[in-house]
Amino acid sequence: MHPILVSGRRLALYLMAWAPLAALLVYVAWAAAGMPWRDAAMVLAPACVIFAFDCLSPYYICRARPLTAATAPSMIVTWIGAGAGGGATLAGCAWLAGWILNKPVQGRFTLFFAMGALLYLLSAGVHYALLAVESSREADRRAAEARTLAREAQLEALKFQINPHFLFNSLHSIAALATLDGVRAREMCVKLSEFLRSSLGLENRERIPLEEELALARSYLEVERVRFGERLRVTEQIEPDCRGCAVPALLLQPLVENAVKHGIAGLVEGGEIRIQARWHAGEVIITIENSFDPEAAAPGRLGMGLKHVRRRLAVRYGDQGEMEAGPADGVYRVRVRLPCER
């Protein structure tokens, strides 16, 4: 519904704004067409009331057909037809009012048609301007919410980093390795510190290149690979065109964490995590697949980490970003699609 029609106060103010326009039309009819001003007022006043509602219709056309360079040729045809329809509406209403009030408007139909077409196209321009302002405000709102969610993601990462369960498992593995394989124990200490340093080093960065995001995911997986040994296998297929695409910071962290926690950790023989990224038509498509136990009870809904990722995509990219998750072809697959912004 048109924003003006949702409120009686807005509608009243809109109709009041038409009073000077109606007065201008009366003046033009009197000065340019020689029509007595009283007759012009009696004919154009009711015609303008009806025409005022007709001038709200460009709102729906403007929303359905955004004005861009690519659509300019077809838009010219669309608005020529729409302007002609608007002109016919004003001229037809004026003729009908003149016929009812016995104030003939013969010889002035063309003038009323031209004025109606001009005002209708002017209304379309105003609607485009208002939609641009609305779009800018919505983008600002989304950007602000994205900043908030980015901070929340960093806080969640910090919580994960100091999670006693994670640290206990890591330190326990280090302690066990220290007596059996001092080299691997030292390696795990180094990888754990690199992972923590990388996560903390994000500070307030909302977006980072995909290459940096993948490096952070690798750092986490390296820690887990020392702990799981040969049970955790990781492969990557990253197209070069994707590496410079900007993605929300810590977007992949919950995905690889779930792949280890709910996939590899539940398999005695372990499994594989595959990370793929490809560029297509201005978008980057990231796919994370992991082995899992098909006999284990499947989660009835997305976990909090996946919900958080989906929410961040919706806030940052709207309909241009999406995430799909679920078992497919014997693996658990998460697919993320978002615009490639350099």
Image: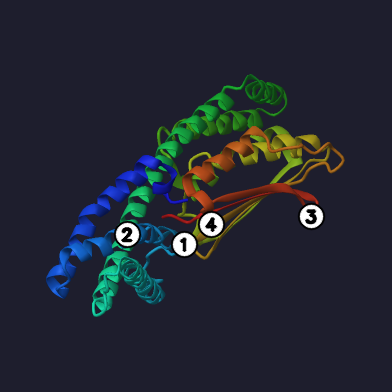
* Disc ID at residue 46: 2
Q: CA distance from mark 4 to mark 1?
A: 27 Å
Instruction: Estimate the x, y position of residue 265 in percent, counting from the top left.
Output: 76, 35
* Disc ID at residue 91: none
* Disc ID at residue 64: 1
Label 3 element class = loop
Instruction: Estimate the x, y position of residue 10 in percent, counting from the top left.
Output: 35, 43
In screen coordinates, is 237 left or right of 298? left
Instruction: Estimate the x, y position of residue 308 in percent, counting from the top left.
Output: 58, 36
Compare marks 3 and 1 and give the one earlier in the sequence: 1
The residue that label 3 is drawn on is 329
Compare marks 1 and 2 and give the one earlier in the sequence: 2
In screen coordinates, is 135 left or right of 287? left
The three-letter amino acid code for the residue at tag 4 is Val
Q: CA distance from mark 4 to mark 3?
A: 22 Å
Label 4 element class = strand
Label 2 element class = helix
Residue at image position (56%, 26%) is: 161
